[in-house]
């Protein structure tokens, strides 16, 4: 029985760290494969899927610059890290028979397609998963902003942000057992309360374009499918 969904096209944003599993660095192939299976289930429901994967499991511009590296160079290294993660996800999806494309904001034609909006839209219409890599292509941004930007450009109905917890809490639920989860919260409340959902530029870009952000747990098996079927617990930022 295929569960029904009201979503036609969504953006799935995951951090690079989501691909680490329980390891401390880089890629954990069984974890990459597990997430790819979650994506396949949703793909099989007929949903058009965009993905942005961060790079924090490999390199973050801010930590590079904290170690004395020039910031923009460090940021480009971070963007390149996201390309590696995207390629790993592409490989895992293709192994499952899901057609997909890695589309890079920085040209590297031997490795990935360049970003051409109309072409990407066409891939989605043909039910190919589009993995947008290299962030926005600009230093001083994050992959949260890249996900919001591409979600707007691709006319996604929502950003689904997969995290370690099943939504947005009033304080860190990992360290505060009495933390309370919001069912819904406004963009402005997220900004005013400094809740760690996405960085402020990403939240503002989503707000200004009325793009809902759904925060859910990627650690929960079937979590991605559940959200699309309207099941499970999550927080909607709107
Ligand atoms: N980055 C960037 N511009 C972008 C997207 C990413 O410069 O548009 C760099 C930035 O240095 C960032 C790194 O790439 O630290 C990895 O991305 P991010 O921190 O968003 O990854 P995540 O935390 O989601 O794993």
Image (cartoon, grey):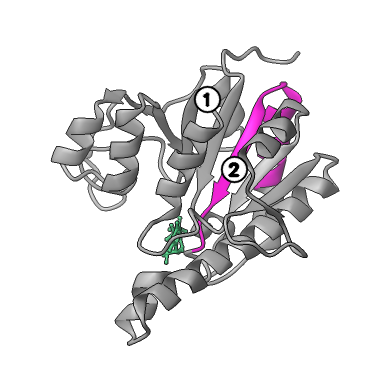
Q: Position of residue 177 (x, y in %)?
A: 25, 44
Residue pictured at 61% horizontal, 27% vertical: 225
Which residues lie in the magenta part? 35-55
How far apart are the alpha carbons under marks 2 and 1?
16 Å
Q: Is residue 211 above or below residue 133?
A: above
Labels 2 & 1 near each other (Cβ < 8 A): no
160 to the left or right of 193? right
41 to the left or right of 132? right
Residue pictured at 59% horizontal, 61% vertical: 106
According to the picture, the residue beneath numbered tag 1 turns out to be: 227
Q: Residues within 10 Å of mark 1 (few under 14, many from 20)?
A: many
83 to the left or right of 24? right
Name the outermost residue toward the bottom: 68
Image quarter for residue 61? bottom left
Q: Nearer the viewer, mark 2 or mark 1?
A: 2
- Badge 2 marks a residue whose secondary structure is strand
Q: Nearer the viewer, residue 31 or 96?
A: 96
């Amino acid at each position: 029985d295929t569960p029904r969904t009201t979503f036609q096209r969504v953006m799935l944003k995951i951090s690079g760290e989501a691909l680490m599993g329980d390891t401390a660095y880089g890629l954990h192939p069984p974890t990459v494969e597990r997430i790819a299976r979650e994506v396949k289930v949703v793909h099989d429901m007929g949903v058009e899927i965009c993905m942005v994967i961060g790079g924090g499991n490999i390199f973050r511009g801010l930590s590079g610059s904290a170690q004395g590296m020039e910031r923009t160079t460090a940021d480009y290294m971070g963007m390149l890290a996201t390309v590696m993660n995207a390629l790993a996800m592409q490989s895992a999806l293709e192994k499952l028979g899901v057609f997909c494309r890695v589309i890079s904001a920085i040209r590297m034609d031997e490795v990935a397609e360049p970003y051409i909006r109309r072409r990407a839209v066409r891939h989605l219409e043909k039910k190919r998963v589009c993995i947008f890599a290299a962030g926005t292509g600009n230093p001083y941004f994050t992959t949260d902003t890249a996900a919001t930007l591409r979600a707007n450009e691709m006319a996604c109905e929502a950003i689904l942000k997969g995290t370690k917890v099943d939504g947005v809490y009033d304080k860190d639920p990992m360290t505060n057992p009495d933390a309370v989860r919001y069912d819904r919260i406004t963009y402005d409340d997220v900004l005013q309360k400094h809740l760690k959902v996405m960085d402020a530029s990403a939240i503002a870009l989503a707000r200004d374009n009325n793009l809902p952000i759904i925060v859910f747990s990627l650690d929960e098996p079937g979590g991605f499918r559940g959200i699309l079927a309207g099941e499970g617990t999550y927080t909607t930022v709107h």
